[in-house]
Image (spheres, helix red, strand yellow):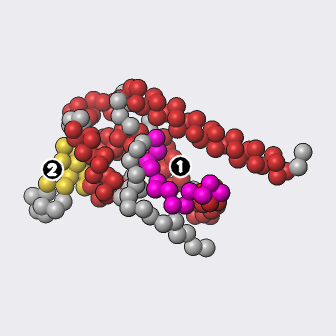
Amino acid sequence: MKLKPVMVAGIIDDIRRVFQVLTEQSRKIEHETSLTGPQLWVVKILKETSPLKVSDLARRMYLHPATMVGLLDRLESKGLLKRTRSEKDRRVVHIDLTEQGRELEINSPEVIQNLLIKGLETLTEQKLKMISDGMGEVVNILGAQNVPPQLIMSSEVNAPKRRRNVSN
């Protein structure tokens, strides 16, 4: 068998594996917590380090602050977090978990986004560039360059649209 078909088959299988893990973990999270993966991810980060400013939380999740606000609104409406305006600077809002949010996090499953980011952040710039280039090629092959990036297994879109701009 020629190398090219074997490599294509391997790439397709790897994409299938990624989708399978994302789907299974998302179902598990929703079944056990009634939250989406991104919502549980917020809860997990706040459990580790809180209170946090909205901008700091967005940065830790690699999300735009506008996207963050939608997630926070839903979590606040469920009674899982609270927002407190800073006394020093009224423009700054700190986010913390409620007792209900802390209890929910205790027995909740791991969040796939967190595993992915932790793993990617440990890679060298060279490996990250290779992955970025490869993912860019997959996006181009699928004609998905202009598709707004939805959060993993969620209807949330990471807005505003950011362009990939990785230079050599």
In magenta, the rendered stretch is 141-153
Of circles 2 and 1, the one toward us is 2
Q: Quadrant of the C terminus?
A: bottom right
Image x and y of residue 4, in percent = 82, 52
Residue 11's x, y, as percent? 70, 47
Nearest the eye: 30 or 61? 30
Which label sits on residue 84?
2
From the viewer's side, name the closer residue of 48 and 165.
165
* 32 lies left or right of 134: left
Q: Amino acid at mark 2?
A: Thr
Q: Splitting the image into 4 quarters, where does residue 93 fall? A: bottom left
Q: Residue at (22%, 48%) from the top-left corner? A: 95
Q: Amino acid at mark 1?
A: Gly
Read off the residue under disc 1. Answer: 119
Instruction: Locate residue 152, reporting x and y percent.
Output: 47, 44
Tell me, yes or no, whether the highlighted magenta stretch contains residue 152: yes
Image coordinates of residue 10 in percent, x first then y, are 74, 44
Measure the C-alpha gap from mark 2 to mark 1: 32 Å
Question: In the displayed structure, would residue 55 be above or below residue 6?
Answer: below
What's the residue at 21%, 35% (across, down)? Answer: 79
Mark 2 vs 1: CB contact within 8 A:
no
Q: Is residue 44 visible to us here?
A: no
| Front residue of this view, candidates 59 and 78 | 78
